[in-house]
Image (spheres, grey):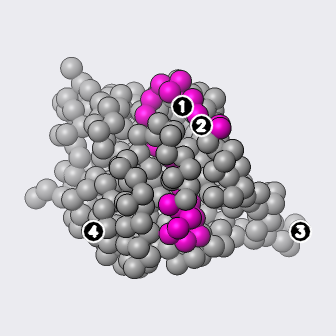
Amino acid sequence: MITIKSDFLGMKLSNPLILASGIMGISVGSMKKIADNGAGAVTIKSISKEERLGHNNPTMFSFGDVFMNAVGYSNPGMIEAKKEFSDIDRIGVPVIGSVIGTKADDFVAVIEELKDIKFDAIEIPLSCPHTPGFGVLAGQGTPEATYRITKAVRKATRLPIIIKLSANAPDLTIVAKAAEKAGADAINMGNTHGPGMRIDIDSGKPILDFKVGGISGPAITPVTVRCVYDIYESIKIPIIGTGGITTGRDAIEMMMAGALGLGVGTGIYYRGFDVFKKIANEMKDWMKKKGHLSLKEIIGVAHEG
């Protein structure tokens, strides 16, 4: 019998498809809707120490296979988040917390505040390309910063730690190794790319209020595949491939590059809330045609021979 069940960091998943942070992870109710539509696990929207209003609208738009956003990590802050996510058990699938900060101590403070919430893992994004003070714009994606932040987080929690990296890093494999050395249990590769910009030629102004934003959607899939392929050969901890997955073929390709988990975000925009069920069924159909019974037969095969 064909199965796409997955064991990721001790989480028993019905499939390897994980809701990416920032998309529908704003509440228990929204994540339950995603779980009910076939996600194997979900990730909450990133939480900071203090409340953040984020950037002004418009914060997102799409054109063809490209989706752009500059939300700016809007979130209610750790105190309100603790209330909102207090009953995550009713979501029905494993839940990954997502924590951001401007310095290592901020990550630790949020983790300690949310320690009573029954997350199955903690994700640490060091890769946002469009929010001053965070991610790429704060230099958090360097090997040195990645090691320092990961080390601090490792001391603060016993939960599995997932470090979310950026494709923008010129020394990506070195950054991934730094995270692994500092105690990370997995790498999420990766975040939106960029920043990029599009201009409304009728008004002569950038479309996004923040002017620049992160790039996602099917157009970035080739870059994500290459990044997963590169770091798979450099580290021993598992990888979540995130960026552009919208079909079963995308999912299979990402796993062949070396991903064990599959992050899906803007795929919801392109194919609806049930994109998880659609991708899972397309994966099974492909496996049936090719004679594969489990995902173990697929993961990393592009590295063989």
Write the residue at 18% across / 40% down. Answer: 297
Whichever of labels 3 and 2 marks the residue nearer the N terminus, that label is 2
Residue indicated by mark 2: 85
State the image coordinates of residue 168 (x, y, percent, origin top left): 48, 73
Instruction: Report crowding for label 2: few under 14, some 14 to 19, many 20 or more residues within 10 A (C-alpha).
Output: many
Residue indicated by mark 3: 203
Whichever of labels 4 and 1 marks the residue nearer the N terminus, that label is 1
Highlighted magenta segment, given as a residue range: 83-108
Disc 2 on helix, strand or loop?
Answer: loop
Question: Does 61 sit left or right of 19 as displayed?
Answer: right
Q: Amino acid at mark 2?
A: Phe
State the image coordinates of residue 9 (x, y, percent, origin top left): 30, 44
Q: Amino acid at mark 4?
A: Lys
Instruction: Report crowding for label 3: few under 14, some 14 to 19, many 20 or more residues within 10 A (C-alpha).
Output: few
Q: Mark on residue 181?
A: 4
* Structural distance between the alpha carbons of marks 4 and 3: 49 Å
Q: Is residue 82 above or below residue 254?
A: above
Q: Mark on residue 88?
A: 1
Whichever of labels 3 and 1 marks the residue nearer the N terminus, that label is 1
Figure quadrant of residue 103: bottom right
* Structural distance between the alpha carbons of marks 3 and 2: 42 Å
